[in-house]
Each structure stands twice: as structure tokens, then as C-alpha cells.
Image (cartoon, rainbow, N blue to C red):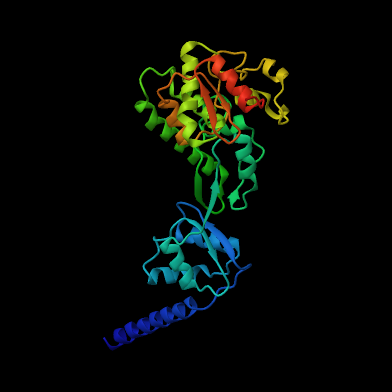
Amino acid sequence: MRFLIKAFFLVFLLLAASAAGIWYWANQPLALKTSPLDFRVTPGSSLRAAIGQMRDAGIAVEPNLLAGLARLQKAETGIKAGSYSVSNGVTPLQLLTKLTRGETTLGNLTLVEGWTFRQWRTRLDRHPDLLHLSSGQSEAQLAEQLGVAGGVLDGRLFPDTYMFDKQSSDLELLARAVRAMQARLDSEWPRRDAGLPYRTPDEALIMASIIEKETGRESDRTKVAAVFVNRLRKGMLLQTDPTVIYGLGERFDGNLRKRDLLEETPYNTYRRPGLPPTPIAMPGLASLQAALHPAPSDVLYFVARGDGSSEFSRTLDEHNRAVNKYQRGGK
């Protein structure tokens, strides 16, 4: 009996010493390869896997001691995935607290309304906080990965400011933008006005992209939509410059010429009736809503006034007078 008591006492002392040793270590600064140091815990990581990821990133943390500390803190299964940042002086206890509280560091990226995917991709590729997994892939390859039919991403990504874990992939961000646009389209399409000349939600999205490119002032948006909807209803050519420019692609040098308006491309709405085959830019929610709820007006023409707003006309004579006044300097 006395032997058992001594044995239990010895075990108790060993455990207490071990706990004290872990606790002492838990409050000593860790050596870091650089400061500050960023690392990422991938989703689904166990504690041991997370420790491996931290060591690979340059944190000199002892796996068994941190695992022991996590047991003492009852935090073995409380590690949260995400991107983290630590600086010189951080202790194992502070590190474990960050991981269990999910004190992640976030990057952000604003994807702009009216931009094309080519413009968006330039911004994505330059962002230092993203893991660039899409490099070298064509737009068609990316569209296939993202589940977008037709191989074209213009119009399929929702413009917004996206927050993300640092060193998450650009593909993850693009997938979020695809889902966000589809969610807006699914929500807005059933609430559309009756009698619109669109057969599918995709046609409304194409119209929204044209409205986005043609709108210089927010207050004009639904009236711009009315012009194009009225033209479709009457079987008139849309005759919108942004679609022609889109069809020219990289050949467009900033100056739209008469010969460009005569060139045969699928996007030349001066020559081809109806909508172009795909969206020409990323429309925002306001343009999508304008396409589905155009102003109740019989206008068929508009011209820029030079101050960001537009002059709208019902007849060609009115329009020609407006063009003479605002673009040719007439009285």
C-alpha cells in the first residue's frame, strides 16, 4: 500500500513538473524566420497538421510541447483555419490563443463595375496577398473550372469588394464572384417587369452590361435601359459603341472610327440586330435592376451632354438636334 502511495505521488510530481515545464515554455518568445511572419492553416487541418504548416512557414515551435499546451488548454480540436500573422515576441500561448479565437488576417480586393475580365485579371495577378493558381490558364480554361458555360467570364463575376484570407487562391475569389453574380441574377429575374424583350436571364445580363458601359450618371441608368428596351421591342438596331469596342478587342486604340462601325463582328450592334452574344463587361446590381425595370418612357435615342449626363430623345429629329447642340457645338 505504501509503495502504491509513493508511486502515485511520484507520478503526480512528474505530471506537475511536466505541466510546469510546458507552462514556462508557453510564455517564452518563439523564434521566427522573419517578422512579421504570415502563415496559413488550411481548412480541415488537425492540430498536428497546423503545427507542421507553422514550422514550414518559419515558426520554431516544438510540436510535442504545443500539443501538450493545447491539451492543458482543452484546445486540441479548436484550431481555426485561415491566414495569420505573428511578430517577434509572440509566445506559444499567444499563438495558440490566436489559432483558437480565429484571429485571422484578411486581404481585400475591389473588382470594379464596368470592367472586363481582362482588366480584372490584371488586378488579380498583381495582388500580393493572393496565391496565383490561375496563372497560365486561358479564360476558357478558367471558365470551365468555375462552371461557366461558353468560355467567357465577362458579365459572370459580381463587382464588389471581397475580403479573403491572405494567401488563399485567386480561384477561390473568382468562384465567390461567380456565385455572387448568379445569386443576384436568380434573385432579380423573377421580379422583372412584365413584357420585357428578354427570353432568358442571360439576355438580361447582357443588357445590364451594356447599360453599365453606357451610363455616365446614376440618375440616367433606368432611362438608358428604356432606350435599349424600346429599340429591341421595335426591332431597331441597338447601335451602341461599347459593343463595337468590345468586338474589336485589343485592336481598339481608344479612337472609334467609322470603319470600326462598319466592321463585321458578332458584337457590332450597328450591323447586327438584337443583343450581342455575351455580356461585354461586369454589370453592378443597379444596372441589372435597370435592365429588369427600365423607366416607363418611349425614348429611343440619347447623346452625352459632356457633363456625365445624357440628353434623351423620342424622335430622330430631336436626337439630331441634340447631337448638333452637345457634340458639334451648335445652338
From this view, report whether residue 36 is shown above or below residue 27.
Answer: above
Quadrant position of the N terminus in the picture: bottom left
Residue 210, given in percent of the width and then of the height, sits at 54, 27
- Please name the residue shown 67% across and 38% down the image: 136
Residue at the far bottom in the pictured view: 2
From this view, report whether residue 101 is shown above or below residue 300.
Answer: below
Residue at the far top in the pictured view: 235
Residue 123, given in percent of the width and then of the height, sits at 62, 44
Q: What number of labels is visible?
A: 0
Residue 9 visible, this angle: yes
- Please name the residue shown 50% across and 47% down the image: 162
- Please name the residue shown 55% across and 41% down the image: 112
Residue 241 visible, this angle: no
Residue at the far left in the pictured view: 1
Residue 317, given in percent of the width and then of the height, sits at 56, 15
Q: Quadrant of residue 293?
A: top left
Q: Quadrant of residue 144?
A: top right
- Please name the residue shown 46% across and 72% down the image: 93
Quadrant position of the C terminus in the picture: top right
Q: Nearer the viewer, residue 206 or 311?
A: 311
Q: Nearer the viewer, residue 78 or 20?
A: 78
From this view, report whether residue 301 is shown above or below residue 21.
Answer: above
Residue 254, given in percent of the width and then of the height, sits at 71, 31
